[in-house]
Amino acid sequence: MTLRNYIIVCSAACALSSAAQTADSIVWQQLEGITIEQEAPRKLLRGDGTGRLDIDARHLGEQVTLMGSNDPLTLIKTLPGVATTNDLQASLPVRGGTTGDNHFSSDGARVINPLHLLGLYSAFNPAYYDSYTFRDGRIPSTSPFLASAIMTADSGLDPDSVLHGSVSAGLIESHGAISIPVIAGRLSVTFGLRGSYLPLLFPDILTLGTSKLKYGFTDFNGSIKFRSGQERFRLSVFADKDEMSVHEPNRGGKAGNMGWKNRAASLAWNHRWIETTVAYSQHSNTFDMEESGRRIDTPSKIEQISASSAGNLHGYELAIHLLGRKASGQNGFGAGQSGEVKIGAERRFAITPRFSLTGGLSLGAYINGSYRIFLPQPHLDAAFDLGSGYSIWADVARLVGTDRRIEESTAGLPADFWICSNERIKPKDVWAGEIGMSGPIGSTGIGINLSAYAKIIRNETEYRGSLLDLSSADYNPLDDVATGDGYAAGLSVSATKQIGRIRGRLNYNLGISRVKLDGTDDYIPTSHDRPHDFNANINWTAMKGLTIAGSFTYASGTPFTRAKYGYMIGENLICEYFPHNSSRLPAYKRLDVAATWKFNSGRLTHALNLSVYNVLAFKNVLFMFTRYSIEDGIEQRRSEMKAVIPSISYTLSF
């Protein structure tokens, strides 16, 4: 007699009530047609011992929900080595790299810009995806071209057998997703939608000086999954759009519109040991501002089409990546087309029962017009199992990024644009190494991870111009892009507890990021340098279904270039500046708190979340600037974020 359609829950009622405080993940086991379900320790984060960090989408609610949303990048921003950004900044520097050095993807299609404007949310709908993976180091040779971290968001390949989904409604944004089985276990469709409406309920919360901002975004995801025997197929689409308007009626008037859009689609085919993906991605910027008769209008776009295959054959991890890219530059400056190919292989060798070596090599080629370069990238990782859950490792690899983001603003504004590497601004070339150890602290349930990293960086860039320069249509921003070589180094410490009533993470990074630009004699801090970066997160299950969470962040201020003095020529303010990045903003501090009450009614799960962003109203400086007025003359000013933002959201899962 076959019992495949029945589920036997192997837990007594008393065992479930006690285990519910420490476990809610499900482990499935197949025994002669009987499916057994049992509780296993829930873990939001899982490492595989190779530097890869898996994030379980089901447990994102255990972190402090930033403004009511369980956003995956909110979690990633708290990890050691991922630099804290100032409020309202859409950037994600990792281990001395820039945001443009990272590689993000949705179901195999690259998301060229994964953040929404202001940096409050990412473009990844937390209700849509099943899992996320993240690597800030120990990058394997089978990865595509990149110069820093890699993150993937995946909605799964297997068609769903039952109708399920969730919807979350909040004061600031709402999101939801639903999966519909057309043929159970063989064909299903999934849709996800997300939107923000912050100005509707908080019309005066977003201000810069006397400027008023109106802002909103939308995300859309969709997929069709099909299975025939051992063959699995998935067609996915991804789209997002950010729109912001700026209005200031005083002091000569200011008005403008800015934003960006991502469009992506992918087709994945899993055949036995190999998975093949064909994908298209497009990212476009709008930056149209007018103030006192000056107008800046700098649209830009980058798009790419790619094909990749990866799999494991006889113990070897193999991958091939083909890509064509086209960039419009900014006002035509930096426009270009490029093509690249990368073939990589990697394998782990067990030298002894406790000691292993993982070696990999990729061979790549890049072409942009007459500029051509061959890019071999070796990777070597050594790991030693000390027993009792402890391990140590050492890793070295060459990383190369073939597209370059020109960051005209440290805040990640849509004035930033992308170019294809060329003879003038070459691919970013990084030799990255790290050593580390990990293991438990006795029987406390706390795991500790300690790592030291170092990078030697070639072809680093820093923009030394001004956004006001963009008011001239003849201005070439690449003339103010300085290149040079640099280095980054740091020490990361993290302690994590993921079981019990009290769970949490402590993360600290001590790091430096330096560059010596061509034509200069000294190393200077890069724009994203943070010597000290600390994050503490704690979650307390006060009672069954009720979780109280808190998150505290402290980070050194970022570098900026301070004006020495200014003078007026006609109606124009002319400033003289100290050396580039020679000053530093005040330190950044923020405390967030949240409470979530979750309960069931039949097959439905309800969750009510209350959260407060910046509950202590710290006045964090966004940036420093120089301005002129008839009343006050020339003065140094600073823009501060001091808002306390409460939010409430309700989530229904089925």
Image (cartoon, grey):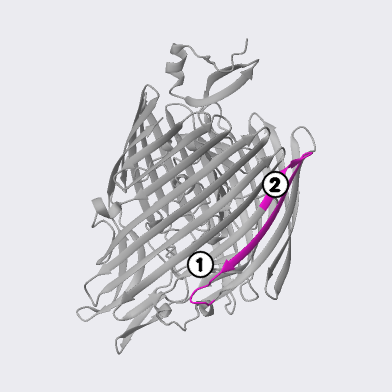
Where are the magenta residues, as a range? 308-333
Magenta region includes residue 275: no
Q: Position of residue 160 (x, y in %)?
A: 53, 32
Please give the residue where the numbered disc 2 appears in the rendered image.
310
Q: Position of residue 138 (x, y in %)?
A: 65, 48
The residue at 40%/75% (across/down) is 297
Q: Of the residues under marks 2 and 1, which one precedes in the sequence? A: 1
Corner quadrant of residue 95: bottom right
Q: Amino acid at mark 2?
A: Ala
Q: Position of residue 291 (x, y in %)?
A: 30, 76
Q: What is the magenta segment's predominant secondary structure?
A: strand
In front: 459, or 68?
68
Give SS at disc 1: strand
Corner quadrant of residue 366: bottom right
Let me know if residue 85 appears in the view: no
Direction top: furthest residue: 1
In front: 68, or 572?
68
In this rendering, the answer to whether 449 lies above or below 239 is: above
Q: Amino acid at mark 1?
A: Lys
Please give the residue where the numbered disc 1 appears in the rendered image.
301
Give SS at disc 2: strand
Q: Residues within 10 Å of mark 1 (few under 14, many from 20)?
A: many
- State yes or no: discs 2 and 1 in contact (Cβ < 8 Å): no
Q: Position of residue 177 (x, y in %)?
A: 43, 40
Let me know if residue 533 appears in the view: yes
